[in-house]
Image (tube, rainbow, N blue to C red):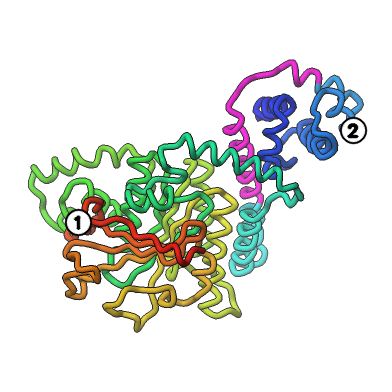
């Protein structure tokens, strides 16, 4: 650990612009060695004053008597390494240390004060852990540097600026799922929102090698696994779970799930308490470097906070998931039900979201799955066939705007596939969030 810290500090002195790029994250607390804490604080002071990092300027800002010798020795051990990886490792280790302290204190509270008080403490502490970050004020030039680097990275990419979903029209329009975003995926009963979320998770993990975790509060892990295997093999999950398969079918399943087997797709086991879900998410980030999370679904999650209405509770949970995504630089997809009594042949809208308009406020993207065929309607409004089709409606798109596109829906496999030949995405530039 100390070697990683000194490697990073050496790199910072030789590359002061890197400190500007990540100064909000390069705080004292991510370092474990006291001398290294002193050095990073000295670097920060120099950058705020002159920006000229060298042996003399850094050592002058340190309180240690042998500061000059410390920095001289540090620079003699100049090792080239992946500093981005080192920073992420130090940040994750810091969060893990804090999480261990939180869990230790929670256990003490259970012993001394009971579960209810410990649960409130744990919930508040986890939120604070995810919200904790440096509050240093910095000039806009630092953000301009970040923006220009982002543009440069985009120019060198394959068209994706985020996590690929495998849904070509969605990826073309959005650049993929963006880290720090909260995405609400909603739909009426039997529209296929769980299947669509599973399709996205599968594609991200298998086709784009993105570590992805699914939290299903409604279905068991074996049921989710059967659905995913069904998408790979072409044999329905109902048959997989409930029928005696032929040897040929069994072999087909074994052969078809090899990529799924080798992927970083995780079916997470957790209670429906938000504290348990957040703790599991953090564990996947630290241990598996997970970047995408799917929670199915929001209305089954509980906050266990007394004195507030269900609407306030759901809204607060949506904001907590958004804060978690932002602070940990991951993408969270929350599935959501629509209001009861809103079962209609008409396509859904933002006002149909169940329990809280605050869900919409917290989300970066709100998208609906809609299948007119389910209601016996054979065509879309534009006259194109709706048989075996689903329309995905982006009703809120912060930074991207509104749009709709269509997918094939294979009902017996509950599987979505691309439909690029007959329909193009339809952006609505008149109303952009």
Residue indicated by mark 1: 413
In the rendered image, the vertical position of residue 49 relative to residue 235, given as above or below: above
Residue at left offset 40%, top offset 52%: 173
Q: Is residue 270 or residue 79 the one in the foreground? A: 79
User: Of helix, strand and loop, which one carries label 1?
Assistant: helix
Q: Mark 1 to mark 2: distance in Å? A: 67 Å
Residue 239: quadrant of the picture:
bottom left
How would you classify the magenta stretch by its main secondary structure?
Answer: helix
Let me know if residue 92 is in the magenta part: yes
Asked whether residue 300 appears in the rendered view, the answer is yes
Let me know if residue 331 is in the magenta part: no
State how many labels appear. 2
Left or right of 171, for residue 122: right
Instruction: Give the magenta range.
Output: 72-101
Residue indicated by mark 2: 63
Residue at left offset 66%, top offset 61%: 109
In the rendered image, the vertical position of residue 135 relative to residue 431, given as above or below: above
The extreme bottom residue here reads: 341
Q: Position of residue 319 (x, y in %)?
A: 56, 65
Q: Position of residue 310 (x, y in %)?
A: 51, 78
Categorize mark 1 by other alpha carbons within 10 Å: few (<14), some (14-19), many (20+). many
Residue at left offset 38%, top offset 49%: 171
Q: Quadrant of the N terminus?
A: top right
């Amino acid at each position: 650990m100390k070697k990683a810290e000194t490697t990073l500090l050496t790199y910072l002195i030789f590359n002061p612009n890197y400190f500007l790029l990540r100064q909000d994250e390069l705080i004292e607390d991510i370092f474990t060695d006291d001398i290294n804490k002193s050095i990073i604080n000295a670097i920060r002071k120099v950058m705020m004053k002159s920006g000229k990092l060298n042996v003399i300027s850094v050592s002058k800002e340190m309180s240690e008597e042998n500061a000059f010798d410390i920095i001289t020795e540090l620079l003699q051990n100049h090792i080239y390494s992946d500093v981005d990886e080192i920073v992420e490792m130090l940040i994750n280790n810091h969060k893990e240390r804090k999480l261990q302290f939180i869990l230790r204190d929670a256990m003490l509270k259970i012993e001394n004060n009971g579960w209810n008080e410990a649960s409130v403490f744990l919930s508040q502490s986890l939120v604070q852990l995810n919200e904790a970050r440096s509050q240093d004020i910095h000039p806009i030039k630092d953000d301009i540097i970040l923006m220009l680097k982002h543009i440069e990275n985009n120019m060198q990419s394959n068209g994706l600026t985020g996590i690929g979903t495998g849904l070509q029209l969605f990826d073309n329009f959005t650049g993929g799922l963006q880290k720090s975003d909260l995405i609400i995926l909603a739909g009426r009963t039997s529209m296929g929102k769980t299947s669509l979320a599973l399709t996205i998770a599968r594609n991200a993990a298998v086709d784009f090698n993105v570590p992805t975790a699914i939290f299903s509060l409604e279905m068991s892990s074996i049921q989710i696994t059967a659905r995913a295997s069904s998408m790979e093999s072409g044999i329905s999950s109902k048959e997989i779970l409930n029928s005696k398969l032929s040897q040929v079918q069994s072999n087909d399943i074994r052969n078809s799930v090899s990529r799924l087997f080798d992927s970083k797709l995780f079916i997470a086991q957790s209670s429906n308490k938000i504290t348990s879900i957040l703790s599991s998410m953090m564990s996947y980030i630290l241990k598996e470097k997970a970047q995408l999370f799917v929670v199915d679904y929001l209305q089954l999650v509980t906050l266990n906070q007394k004195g507030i209405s269900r609407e306030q509770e759901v809204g607060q949970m949506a904001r907590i998931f958004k804060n978690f995504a932002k602070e940990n630089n991951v993408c969270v997809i929350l599935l959501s039900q629509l209001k009861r009594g809103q079962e209609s042949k008409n396509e859904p809208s933002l006002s149909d979201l169940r329990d809280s308009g605050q869900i919409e406020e917290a989300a970066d993207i709100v998208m609906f799955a809609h299948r007119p065929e389910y209601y016996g309607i054979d065509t879309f409004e534009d006259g194109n066939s709706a048989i075996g089709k689903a329309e995905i409606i982006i009703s809120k798109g912060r930074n991207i705007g509104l749009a709709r596109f269509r997918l094939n829906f294979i009902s017996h496999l509950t599987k979505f596939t691309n439909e690029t030949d007959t329909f193009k995405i339809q952006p609505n530039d008149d109303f952009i969030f």
